[in-house]
Image (cartoon, grey):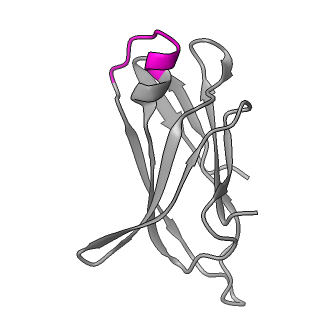
Amino acid sequence: MSTVTTHVLDTALGIPAAGVPVRLERIGPGTVDEVARAVTDDDGRARDLGPDDLPAGTYRITFDTAAHASATAQDNFFPEVAITFTLVAQDDGAVAHHHVPLLLSPFHYSTYKGS
């Protein structure tokens, strides 16, 4: 399983947001490097978003929410949602799995550190 996974739920329609393009990037001093791209499956999940092992650091996950709004004929105030977070190494030096869910509606979104 990838170190970072996500799940997008369309709270306006009450369904998983399938077909959302997702990009994962690592952010360093003066640099932004793409790690992976994926598209959410029929359950709204991107399970294979990058490698199984990522180094500690700052990352950004960006969701192309305009694509989902277009596919579901919804208004869309936020054409993309970018969430920046930090992966920290554990005592053994490994970085644990992190799940970054997105709850989406035409005029609102929220996120949290999932499990």
Query: Which residue does the image show at 67% across and 34% down from the upper left?
Result: 44
In this orientation, which residue lies closer to the viewer: 76 or 101? Answer: 76
Query: Which residue does the image show at 33% across and 21% down from the upper left?
Result: 77
Q: Is residue 111 magenta?
A: no
Could you say where residue 87 lies in the image, as x and y percent from the top left?
55, 70
Could you say where residue 89 lies in the image, as x and y percent from the top left?
61, 81
Main secondary structure type of the part rendered in magenta = loop
In the picture as drawn, the residue positioned furthest to the left comes out as 30
Which quadrant would residue 94 be assigned to in this image?
A: bottom right
Query: Which residue does the image show at 45% across and 64% down from the upper left?
Result: 59
Quarter of the rendering occupied by the N terminus: bottom right
In this orientation, which residue lies closer to the viewer: 49 or 97? Answer: 49
Q: Is residue 39 left or right of residue 52?
A: left
State which region is magenta: 69-77
Which quadrant would residue 33 be assigned to in this image?
A: bottom left
Could you say where residue 106 lies in the image, as x and y percent from the top left?
43, 17
Q: Is residue 71 magenta?
A: yes
Question: Against 93, is 6 above or below?
Answer: above
